[in-house]
């Protein structure tokens, strides 16, 4: 699933290609908007909001899209071949005199009034890469349900917007807590560090072509995607298990030595034996 930094990069590419230019082609290949036509209107800006993209067009309209698991926007110079996927996966085409933006596999695509954008993104918490970032509010949101597992709380975009599965696992590692630790049991000092640490990770990666959380050239991530290889710190095999509410489970990675707190419950399909550690 794209994370906040990925969406921020997509918004920057789309803004550079479209903002200030008149649409010469507007094609939404979803039944609800099949007849919508905004050709002749100028694109005002493309703004990221958490994992959402808002393409604002003159006349008070916004094209709202969300990439979910495998959606993407590609920008092509006119005359170049579109290579983002087969034609049947195209959901949106926005063209100008010079370039064309093509949206592939977009599970969320809707046209709404700009004045009503809150219908789409009003539920989101403070945006880690946005002008509304408020670390105190983000922390209060996270601690509002103290029994909720830390990993689930981090993924809930109502608490803070922009964290995906990669950053969830990496943040938990850097905080020294398993993703199943109730968020209210996170030591006060570590909890206070969480908002600034999350923001730092996304900020340093928003301009990078390859996401990195370790600061090491030889390894991009501490735990994400590394099971069952050795932990970079202690050499204990990294473990993985599904985490979620049953309907939206995602693979989660952790080091059973470097991270304290509960391991996943039986049935979570963990690699290696489950165990619980207490805080040192």
Image (cartoon, rainbow, N blue to C red):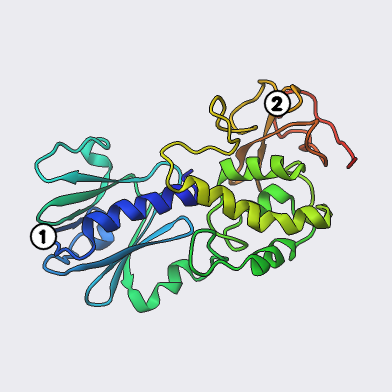
Q: Residue at x 74, y 66 (%)?
A: 144
- Which residue in the structure is indicated by mark 2? 231
Say above or below: 110 vs 213.
Answer: below
- Residue 19 image-quadrant placement: bottom left
Residue at x 46%, y 55% (from the top left corner): 51
Give x and y (percent) for residue 130.
48, 64
Judging depth in this view, the residue of 175 and 244 nearest the camera is 175
Which residue is pictured at 28% across the width and 41% down the height? 89
Q: Nearer the viewer, mark 1 or mark 2?
A: 2
Disc 1 crowd, CA 10 A, few/some/many (<14, 14-19, 20+) = some
In this view, 67 is above or below 64: above
Left or right of 127? Residue 6 is left
Q: Quadrant of the C terminus?
A: top right
Measured as percent of width and height from the top left, residue 155 is found at 61, 52
- Nearest the viewer among 146 and 257 is 257
Q: CA distance from mark 1 to mark 2?
A: 52 Å
Residue 14 location, x and y as percent?
Answer: 28, 54
- Element marked by disc 1: loop
Q: Residue 24 got which mark?
A: 1
Mark 2 burial class by Cα count in 10 Å: few <14, some 14-19, many 20+: many
Specify the label residue 145 is tagged with.
none
Figure check: 248 above or below 122: above
Residue 240: image location, x then y, percent? 67, 30
Up-down: is 116 above or below 273?
below
Helix, strand or loop under label 2: loop
Q: Earlier in the sequence, mark 1 or mark 2?
A: 1
| Residue under the image location 74 percent in, 62 percent down | 143
Q: Foreground residue, 219 or 64?
A: 219
Quadrant in the picture for residue 21: bottom left
């Amino acid at each position: 699933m794209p994370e906040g930094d990925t969406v921020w990069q997509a918004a920057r590419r789309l803004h550079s290609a479209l903002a200030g230019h008149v649409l010469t082609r507007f094609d939404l290949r979803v039944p609800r908007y099949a007849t919508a036509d905004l050709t002749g209107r100028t694109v005002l800006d493309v703004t990221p909001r958490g994992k959402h993209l808002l393409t604002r067009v003159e006349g008070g309209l916004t094209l709202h899209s969300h990439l979910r698991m495998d959606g993407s926007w590609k920008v092509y110079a006119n005359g170049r071949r579109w290579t983002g996927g087969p034609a049947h996966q195209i959901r949106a085409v926005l063209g100008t005199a010079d370039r064309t933006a093509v949206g592939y596999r977009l599970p969320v695509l809707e046209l709404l009034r700009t004045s009503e954008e809150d219908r789409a993104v009003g539920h989101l918490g403070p945006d880690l890469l946005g002008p509304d970032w408020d670390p105190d509010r983000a922390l209060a949101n996270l601690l509002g349900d103290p029994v909720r597992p830390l990993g689930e709380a981090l993924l809930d975009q109502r608490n803070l917007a922009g964290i995906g599965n990669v950053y969830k696992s990496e943040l938990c590692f850097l905080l020294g807590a398993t993703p199943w630790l109730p968020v209210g049991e996170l030591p006060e000092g570590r909890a206070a560090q969480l908002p600034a640490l999350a923001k730092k990770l996304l900020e340093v990666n928003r301009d990078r072509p390859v996401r990195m959380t370790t600061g090491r050239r030889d390894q991009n991530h501490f735990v994400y995607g590394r099971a069952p290889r050795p932990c970079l710190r202690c050499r204990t095999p990294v473990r993985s298990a599904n985490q979620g509410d049953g309907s939206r489970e995602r693979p989660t990675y952790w080091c059973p030595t470097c991270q304290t707190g509960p391991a996943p419950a039986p049935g979570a399909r963990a690699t290696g034996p489950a165990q619980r550690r207490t805080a040192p």
